[in-house]
């Protein structure tokens, strides 16, 4: 009775995350070796978390591996119904024999055994018989055996005797992966951040999650517009049903019985064309349609259609199909090692089979490394001063003995102080070492890659890719907050790399111990290395940065300008860039040379030539301490309207 | 116009509804239009006078979807029936894969029917097409009118169908015989695919 197995529910279509990993692994094991490893396998979990999916996937995988197996899937209610029918027909023995001959018995929803003493006894007998014969049983329930009310003790012990695993609510990353896959299956597109927003919401199960996705798809289809993250949030926040405006009428239904006449006509035409079109052309046409539909180029087949009486049509079609199969195999091989390379067009053109082979060989020779450091941040260009001396010394020490001295090295500090620069600079230096594979990327990219890997069932590939790294450098590590799966994977990767003495470097805006949403085990590991802080740039750093920025602008400048700008307060390296931009822009507008005078005028609103401005500087009269937080003169209001102007303003 | 294009895998049938004025050609198309799902039909183009007479021609494209690997489309045209629009009729006839001749069953319209049939033959000849080689079916429309006003199918066959092509009694206003006629002409047209005599 394997017909009850829904082909849609296979292992391939199951998104695996931390919450169901154990159950899926056990399920795969059972499907590959029924009756030998975990027998019975008892899977429990809340509604809508994929128990039935997994149960059917086990059945299908087992059937695929051993087609001769007698596999039966049914719900407990169906089992009860079949039993009652058999008993009523006086064929209780036939019923028992039927189930005792099943090689893999998959029973869904056994929690309904409550208060069914007779069925419990029957199931107990069956359980014993199947186990004795070495046949596999897999059961699902919404609760563990001991919690099924009124369940016979012997059944509890039987059910618990194999393996009892639970399926939990999927974590954030898995939820994103599920949504992305479903959206792709449905051909729905969303603006960046929408699916992530949905995933971040507290859905109790996958069904609800997919329900939310359906609402988004329906909304977008009806309104013919793309929702953004905020819109999606608002839409899902509404408890009432989404606006389900009717789609435009399809027309056929407008006239009573309208479809029938046309349908019959269509059938007749189809039959006539079927008889009329030359059979071989139809075969070629179908092959072209099929392969084109799957995204393959079909020049070879189309060329056949140009001929009047081609020779071995079927042989050409078969050879084409074989080439496509080869391409598929090559693409799968490449995809496992380097997903980006797998997307190339040569894998869609059987005429380019040779090229595809070459590429596969190339990729096999060297698995694509994880994302590396950016060449835009060389260490030589990093301005050093008292404010970042400690951090730079730590980086140099790490470079001398990577993985051995400061591991992990954590760079902290506010935004714009050069953490990212220093991280990539260190990465670049490390990458120059022989055989180095430096993974240097933002934490957001790290999370996105992980989600893609989960989505594509390529976790092994993902892990292998990072495990071969000789150094792992992650920017903005605080972004893993709340992302349980990422933290789990990072934790394992961290341990492995640290054990192998591979250098680990992270940046974060605040001290690791203050990071909310980051698991204690990760926080403590971050603190376990060296945590160094980058302070606001001191004068030396400011001067060096300004010199570099001015040079980059390719504008002539004098020492006085440099000195003046270096004296200006700036709380970050980025702010210094801003200063230079303002001066350069003003010079361009006024068509004036860039010098200290102009800079003063632009940044302080004050002319160097006092004669040009007789009124001098007017202030609000407030004296602001430099410790009060307002340190930048540019952010102060210096020019206040005089009393008359203020009165006019108020009168208005 | 090629009926079948094996390279682009398209079948395009151009069927022209021909006949005297007021015989019900446009009515045929309107009925078909009402029965074809919206997704499968194009916009029906009708150029009519104020009194609803076809001025130029009606055009109804129908997409039948994929049939045996071929993207199949029907294009249904009508011609203006009035005698003085002959140039338009000839233009519309150009490249036709089949013709439905819609005859008015009223006895008093017999002469107009015969005249229109001869006009069809003449126009085809001018286009270099022998009517004997072109799929043609006859439709005897308005069979719902009182018996005393109309000729029966057998009589009309005697008068008009001297080549014994398929003929259909119809009441296009209410849809009777409309799809039977369309089916009849489609079969004739499509069967020519096998013979490889596509126009």
Image (cartoon, helix red, strand yellow):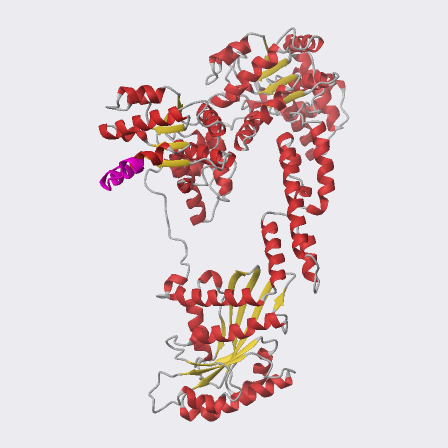
Quick one: A39 or A338, which is closer to the camera? A39
Q: Does residue B198 sit above or below A568 in this rendering?
A: below
Left/right placement of residue A118 relative to residue A205 reads: left
Q: Is residue A250 left or right of residue A153?
A: right
Quick check: can you spot residue A555?
Answer: yes
Figure quadrant of the N terminus of chain A: top left
Overall secondary structure of the magenta stretch? helix
Task: Name the residue located 60 percent from the left edge and 20 percent from the top edge.
Answer: A474
Image x and y of residue A322, in percent: 65, 45
The x and y percentages for residue A13 are 49, 36
What range is drawn magenta here? A78-95
Q: Is residue A460 above or below residue A248?
A: above
Query: In the image, is residue A253 above or below residue A344?
Result: below
**Quarter occupied by residue A72:** top left
Residue A534 at x, y percent in the picture? 60, 12
Please indicate, yes or no, whether residue A534 appears anywhere in the rendered image: no
**What residue is shown at x 51% (from left), y 41% (from top)?**
A184
Q: Residue B15 appears at what percent x and percent y?
A: 54, 75
Q: Is residue B190 magenta?
A: no
């Amino acid at each position: 009775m394997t017909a009850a197995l829904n082909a849609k529910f296979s292992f391939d279509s199951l998104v695996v995350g931390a919450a169901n990993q154990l159950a899926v692994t056990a399920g795969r094991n059972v499907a590959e070796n029924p009756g030998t490893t975990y027998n019975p396998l008892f899977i429990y979990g809340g509604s809508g978390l994929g128990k039935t999916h997994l149960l059917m996937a086990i059945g299908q995988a087992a059937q695929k591996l051993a087609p001769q197996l007698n596999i039966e899937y049914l719900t407990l209610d169906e089992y009860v119904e079949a039993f009652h029918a058999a008993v009523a027909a006086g064929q209780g023995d036939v019923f028992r024999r039927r189930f005792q001959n099943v090689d893999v018995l998959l029973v869904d929803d056994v929690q309904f055994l409550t208060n069914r003493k007779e069925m419990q006894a029957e199931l107990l007998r069956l359980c014993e018989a199947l186990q004795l014969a070495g046949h596999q049983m897999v059961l699902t329930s919404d609760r563990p055996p001991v919690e099924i009310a009124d369940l016979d003790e012997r059944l509890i012990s039987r059910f618990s005797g194999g393996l009892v695993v639970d399926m939990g609510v999927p974590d954030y990353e898995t939820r994103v992966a599920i949504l992305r896959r479903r959206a792709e299956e449905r051909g729905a597109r969303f603006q960046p951040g929408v699916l992530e927003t949905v995933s971040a919401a507290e859905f109790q199960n996958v069904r609800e999650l997919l329900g939310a996705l359906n609402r988004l798809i329906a909304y977008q289809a009806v309104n013919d517009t793309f929702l953004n993250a905020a819109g999606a949030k608002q839409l899902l926040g509404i408890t009432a049903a989404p606006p389900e405006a009717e789609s435009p009428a399809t027309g056929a239904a407008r006239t009573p019985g309208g479809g029938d006449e046309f349908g019959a006509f269509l059938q007749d035409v189809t039959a006539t064309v079927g008889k009329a079109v030359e059979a071989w052309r139809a075969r070629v046409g179908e092959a072209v349609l099929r392969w084109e539909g799957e995204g393959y180029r079909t020049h070879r087949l189309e060329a056949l259609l140009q001929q009047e009486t081609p020779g071995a049509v079927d042989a050409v079609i078969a050879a084409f199909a074989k080439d496509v199969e080869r391409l598929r195999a090559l693409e799968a091989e490449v995809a496992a090692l380097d997903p980006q390379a797998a997307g190339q067009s040569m894998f869609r053109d059987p005429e380019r089979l040779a090229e595809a082979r070459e590429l596969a060989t190339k990729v096999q020779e060297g698995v694509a490394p994880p994302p590396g450091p950016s060449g835009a941040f060389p260490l030589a260009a990093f301005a050093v001063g008292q404010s970042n001396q400690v951090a730079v010394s730590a980086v140099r020490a790490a470079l001398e003995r990577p993985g051995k001295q400061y591991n992990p090295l954590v760079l902290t500090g506010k935004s714009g102080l050069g953490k990212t620069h220093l991280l990539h600079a260190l990465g670049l230096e490390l990458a120059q070492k022989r055989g180095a594979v430096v993974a240097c990327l933002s934490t957001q990219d790290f999370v996105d890659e992980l989600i893609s890997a989960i989505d594509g069932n390529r976790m092994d590939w993902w892990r292998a890719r990072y495990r071969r790294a000789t150094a792992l450098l992650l920017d903005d590590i605080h972004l893993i907050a709340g992302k349980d799966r990422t933290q789990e994977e990072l934790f394992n990767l961290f341990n492995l790399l640290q054990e192998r003495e591979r250098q680990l470097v992270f940046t974060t805006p605040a001290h690791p111990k203050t990071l909310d949403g980051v698991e204690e085990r990760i926080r403590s590991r971050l603190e376990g290395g060296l945590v160094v802080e980058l302070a606001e740039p001191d004068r030396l750093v400011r001067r060096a940065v300004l010199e570099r920025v001015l040079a980059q602008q390719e504008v002539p400048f004098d020492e006085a300008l440099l000195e003046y700008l270096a004296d200006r307060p700036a709380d970050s390296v980025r702010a210094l860039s801003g200063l230079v931009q303002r001066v350069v822009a003003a010079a361009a507008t006024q068509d004036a040379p860039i010098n200290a005078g102009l800079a003063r005028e632009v940044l302080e609103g004050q002319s160097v030539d006092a004669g040009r401005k007789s009124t001098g500087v007017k202030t609000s009269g407030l004296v602001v301490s430099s410790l009060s937080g307002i340190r930048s003169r540019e952010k102060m209001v210096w020019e206040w309207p005089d009393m008359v102007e203020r009165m006019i303003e108020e009168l208005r | 116009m090629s009926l079948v294009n094996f390279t682009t895998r398209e079948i395009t049938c151009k069927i022209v509804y021909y006949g005297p004025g007021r015989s019900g050609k446009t009515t045929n198309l309107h009925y078909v239009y009402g029965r074809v799902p919206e997704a499968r039909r194009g916009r029906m183009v009708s150029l009519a006078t104020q009194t609803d007479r076809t001025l130029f021609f009606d055009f109804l494209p129908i997409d039948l979807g994929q049939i045996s690997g071929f993207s199949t489309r029907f294009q249904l045209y009508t011609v203006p029936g009035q005698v003085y629009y002959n140039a338009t009729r000839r233009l519309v006839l150009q490249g036709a894969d089949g013709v439905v001749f819609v005859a008015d069953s009223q006895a008093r319209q017999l002469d107009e029917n015969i005249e229109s049939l001869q006009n069809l033959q003449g126009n085809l000849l001018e286009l270099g097409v022998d009517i004997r080689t072109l799929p043609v079916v006859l439709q005897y429309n308005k069979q719902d009118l009182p018996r005393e006003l109309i000729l029966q199918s057998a009589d009309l066959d005697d008068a008009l169908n001297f080549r014994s092509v398929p003929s259909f009694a119809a009441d296009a206003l209410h849809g009777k015989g409309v799809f039977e006629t369309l089916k009849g002409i489609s079969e004739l047209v499509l069967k020519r695919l096998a013979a490889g005599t596509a126009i």
